[in-house]
Amino acid sequence: MVKYLLVSHTGIIFMHNRGGQASAVEAIIVVVVFILALVLVLRLLPGYIRTTGGEVNNLQLNAMAQSLLTYIVTNPGNPPNWGLNATGLLSFGLAKEGQSYDLDPFKVLQLVYWDYANNVSDALSPGNLQGYCSLSQINGAGFQQYLSQYNVSYISLTSGWLFTIAKPTKASWVISYSYVKRLLGLDNSYDFLLVITPVLNITVMASSSFTTNSFYVYVKVTNYATGQPVSNASVTLNYFAMDQGGDDLACNYSSILASMSNVKVSCVNAPYGTPLPSPSSFTIIQYNPGLVIQGTSTGVTNASGIARLTLPMAYDSDNYYYFVIYASVSGLGDYGYYQYPSFNQTPLLVAGLLPALNGVGNSIVFADPHLFTSCLLNQGLITNPGQSALGLRIIAVFKSEYGYTFRSINFTINPGRGSNSYPVPCSYLNSINTPNYAACYWNLPSTPMLLLVWIQRNSQGQRNSVPTSQLLIIPYGYNPEYYLTGRTIIFGRTVKYAPTGVAQGLVYIGNAAYLVKLYLYYRGNAYGGLGVG
C-alpha cells in the first residue's frame, strides 16, 4: 500500500491510498508537484497578506476620520469665540461653546473667507462673478490703502453689490489650512477635506409667482443631495415687499391705508376665493410715497414639494421683494433667501464684510459704486463711470431673525477720490451735515442678524438706468452659505489616489440642518497615531 500526496489548486495537501507497486518515476512526480505547489503558495501569500492589511488600514482611517470629525463638531476651539477674530486661534473647533453639534455661524463664516481666498469650491468661478479687479483698479487711493491693511490684493463682486476677497492671500485674518492641520495633530502624512452641505434646497418658483395681479408665491423644497421633492414640509415666508406706485395692496386692507394718509387710496381687488392673510400677519412700514410691507406667510408643501403662500399685495412690474424662507420636515430645516427682481441693474451701493481693524468682530463696509467702476464696467452693469448715483442716503437697520430691531443708523455718502475714499465710521457721517466721503464702516454685533440697508439716491436728474432706491438685505452670521451663492462649504485639501477614510454626521447652524462630511487622506509609508489638540 503506497500513500500518494495530492496537492489541490489551493495548496492544501491531501493523503490518498492506492494499491500497487511504487516506482521511482512516481516518487519523482510527487516531489515535483509538491515543490510547484509550495512555490505557488509562497507567491500568493504575500499578496493575500497585503490585501488583508489594506482592509485593516482603511478601517483605521475611517475610525480616525470619525474621531477627527467628532472633535471638530463638538469642540469650540480656543479661544471659544475665535470666529470673531481668527488671528489668535490656538485650537480648532466649530461648535458653539457648550453646544456640541451646533456650529458657531461665525466660525463657519471663517471657512467661507478661506474659500474665497483659495477658491476651492469654485465660488469665484466666472458664472458666479459680476466683476473682478485687482487692488490697483480700485479708483480711490484711500480705499486701496484701507484694503491693503488686510493684505487684500484682489476683490470680486457677487450679487451685483457684495464685494469679497479673491485669489489666495497671506492675510493673517484668513485661517491657514496648514496651521489648522497642525492644531488637529495631523502631520505631513495626512490631509483632510471638510464638506458642509445643506440637507434641504429651497427655491422660489419665479415664473409662477411673479405674474401680474398675482397674490401668490410658490416655494419648492427638495432634497439638496438628490433633488427629490420633499412633501409635507412646513414653510414660513418672512417677506419685505416694496411697491413704488403704492397701489398694489388688496382692497380688503384699504381702511388701513386710509388711516395712514389723506390721499385717495388705490388698491387691487383680489380674485374671489383668494385666501388673503390676516392683517395681523404684516406691518405697513411706509406708505405715500410708495408702499413697504413686512410680514409672514405660512404653508405646507404638496407631493411635488411645492407650497403656495399668499401675500397681501399683488405683483406688478414696479414691485421689489426680498424673502427669508424657512422650511422644515421631521425636525430638519433650512433657510432660503430670494430677491426679486435679481440684481441685474446698476447697484446704488457696494458692501462687504471684513474683520474689524484693531478689534474683535467684523465690520460691514459701505462704499460708493464709483470706487468699483472697473469691476462694474467689466460685467456691463454700468456703461460709463458717471452712471451710478451722485450721492446716497442710507438707512441701515439690524434685525434679529425673529424681527427684533437691534440697532439702526442713517448717513450719507458721496463719490470720493483720494483720502476721502478711506472708510470712516458711519456714525461719524451720521453726525456731520455735509459729508464728502465715499465709504464708511459699521462694526457688527456678535449675534446673528439680518442687516437691512435702504438706499435712496440724492440726485434725481440721472438716467433711467439708475434706480431711485434699492434695498439690500444681508443675512449676517446665521446662514453663512449665503456668501457662497448657495454652494456647499468646503475647507481643506484632497489627495488623489490616496487611501481615504470617511466620516459624516448631522449638525446645525442655528435652526438649519447640514450634513458634514470629513475625508481623511493618508499618503505616508506607515500608519501613525492621530492626536488632536
Image: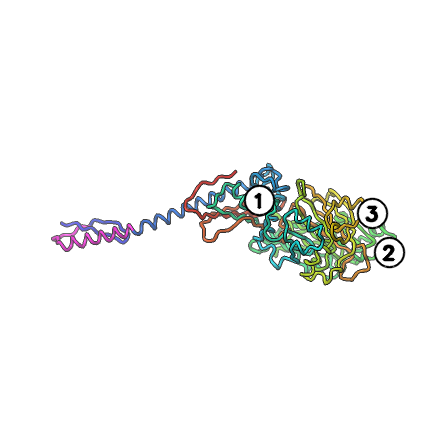
- Disc 1 marks a residue whose amino acid type is Val
Residue 26's x, y, as percent? 15, 54
- Residue 23 among magenta residues: yes
Q: Which residues are magenta?
A: 16-42
Which is more N-terminal, label 2 or label 1? Answer: 2
Residue 208's x, y, as percent? 68, 60
- Residue beneath the point at 64% across and 42% down: 84
Mark 2 — residue?
264
Placement of 9 over or under 184, stated as above or below: below
Mark 1 — residue?
507
In the image: residue 341, left or right of residue 200: right
Label drawn at residue 437: none
Mark 3 — residue?
433
Residue 224's x, y, as percent? 58, 53
- Residue 33 among magenta residues: yes
Asked if labels 1 and 3 touch by Cβ distance under 8 angstroms, the answer is: no
Q: Neighbour class for label 2 at 10 Å: few (<14), some, many (≥20)?
A: few
- Disc 2 marks a residue whose amino acid type is Lys
Count of marks, rendered view: 3
